[in-house]
Amino acid sequence: MNHLHDELSQIWQRIQGSLFPWLEDELGPLSEKQCQLVKVLEIIRIEEHLHSYYHMTGRPPANRVAIARAFVAKMVYNMPFTSMLVERLKSDKTLRRICGWEAQYQVPNESTFSRAYAEFSASRLPERVHEMLIVKKYTKEIIGHLSKDSTAIHAREKPAKEEAKDKPAPKNRGRPKKGEERPKPIDIFPK
């Protein structure tokens, strides 16, 4: 477990010591979510797992590294729709530059994001990144776990009924029976 702690400490020192000051010089002050996004991107290093599309015939595809980083931003920012992500990228200069686009016109449209998402799914990109993190961080480590007993505990299904308390006899409503006398009501406001 020490190996993992040391490696995470080194990553954290690199992020805090060199990456954040450089980013703040380039982009200005970063918000809490932007800092969180930079930390996630630095740890997962998604660009190392993408296929190279250069030297292929035809028009080169849109920047897949920037699109992959934008999909990570979509998860960090908890955006449910890709259209929200595209709008945010076009309006937020800092987020756009963190993902890898300099200008607003460079951000691809929603259909390009959909095609890239299909490619990432077919190539199992998220699974490969997750597998790499596990292999890289937990090699030669013993992983502790917690086992809990799931034995059934016999308990009541319904709460126990409360014992009847000495309640005063209910007042009879309506007209008294023959021979029955009821106490006279107390007059609070005498005449």
Image (cartoon, helix red, strand yellow):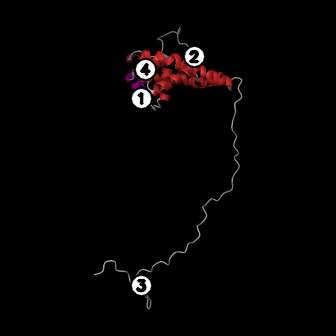
Question: Looking at this view, is 49 or 45 the one in front?
Answer: 45
Residue visible at 48% across and 20% down in the picture = 67
Alpha carbon separation for disc pair 3 and 1: 75 Å
Alpha carbon separation for disc pair 2 and 1: 26 Å
The image shows residue 85 at horizontal and vertical percentages of: 43, 26
The image shows residue 111 at horizontal and vertical percentages of: 44, 23
**Helix or strand or loop: what does disc 3 sit on?**
loop
The image shows residue 137 at horizontal and vertical percentages of: 65, 23
> Contact (CB < 8 A) between labels 2 and 1?
no
Residue visible at 30% across and 80% down in the picture = 190
Asked where in the image residue 159 lies, by quadrant, the reply is: bottom right
| Residue at image mark 2 | 48
| Residue at image mark 4 | 96
Q: Nearer the viewer, mark 4 or mark 1?
A: 4
Q: Earlier in the sequence, mark 2 or mark 1?
A: 2
| Residue at image mark 1 | 84
Left or right: 122, with 112 as reference point: right
| Residue at image mark 3 | 183
**Helix or strand or loop: what does disc 2 sit on?**
helix
Amino acid type at mark 3? Pro
Q: Earlier in the sequence, mark 2 or mark 4?
A: 2
Amino acid type at mark 1? Met
Q: Earlier in the sequence, mark 4 or mark 1?
A: 1
Specify the label residue 29 is tagged with. Answer: none
Tell me if residue 154 comes above or below residue 71 in the rendering. below
